[in-house]
Image (cartoon, rainbow, N blue to C red):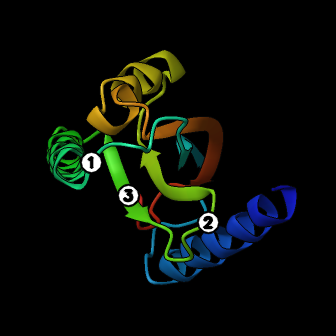
Amino acid sequence: MKSILFLLTIVLGSFTQNCAAQNKNAGENLKPYFLVILKKGPHRDQDSVTAAQIQKAHLENINRMAASGKLNVAGPFLDEGEMRGIFIFDSGNEDEVKKLVDNDPAVKAGRLTYEIHPWMTEKGTCFR
């Protein structure tokens, strides 16, 4: 798990450095975000119809959080492993992020669990 988080840190760092090079205002200050790792939850035994309904509600929730300006990045991992996806939130408050993630239908149903990690990148990168 630590090696995967290390690799994710390198990938995200490389991504934001490439984006920063495209932005003239990069390098001024660091800005905090929250990286959420979504993982397989203990209750993944729903029938296919119920699982599809939960997934649809999960995606609708992602769109709501993005529209609110709090969620900057969301996406699944493609390797079918224990870690299922990520969220990156633009919030100065971990409690707010916890409430947003706890409200996700897939988390509520137990299909997903999560870890929250404070994270920083430079202002002016792709995560404005």
| Tag 1: amino acid | Asp
Marks 1 and 2, how far apart in space? 20 Å
Q: Point out which mark residue 81 bears.
A: 2
- Viewed as shown, does residue 107 lie left or right of 57? right
* Residue at (16% x, 51% y) in the render: 49
Q: Quadrant of residue 73?
A: bottom left
Q: Is residue 111 above or below residue 7?
A: above
CB atoms of marks 3 and 2 within 8 Å: no
Dot 1 falls on a residue whose secondary structure is: loop
Disc nearest the viewer among 3 and 1 = 1
Dot 2 falls on a residue whose secondary structure is: loop
Q: Position of residue 36 (x, y in %)?
A: 54, 43
Q: Position of residue 44 (x, y in %)?
A: 44, 44
Q: Quadrant of residue 106?
A: top left
Q: Position of residue 40 (x, y in %)?
A: 54, 47
Marks 3 and 2, how far apart in space? 20 Å
Disc nearest the viewer among 3 and 2 = 2
Q: Point out which mark residue 101 bears.
A: none
- Viewed as shown, does residue 60 lie left or right of 40? left
Q: Depth check: 22 or 38 in front?
A: 38
> How crowded is the residue under tag 1: few (<14 C-alpha within 10 Å), some, or many (20+)?
few
Dot 3 falls on a residue whose secondary structure is: strand
Q: Point out which mark residue 73 bears.
A: 3
Q: Is residue 47 above or below residue 14?
A: above
Q: Point out which mark residue 47 bears.
A: 1
Q: Is residue 64 above or below residue 21?
A: above
| Tag 2: amino acid | Gly
Number of numbered tags placed on the structure image? 3
Marks 3 and 1, how far apart in space? 29 Å
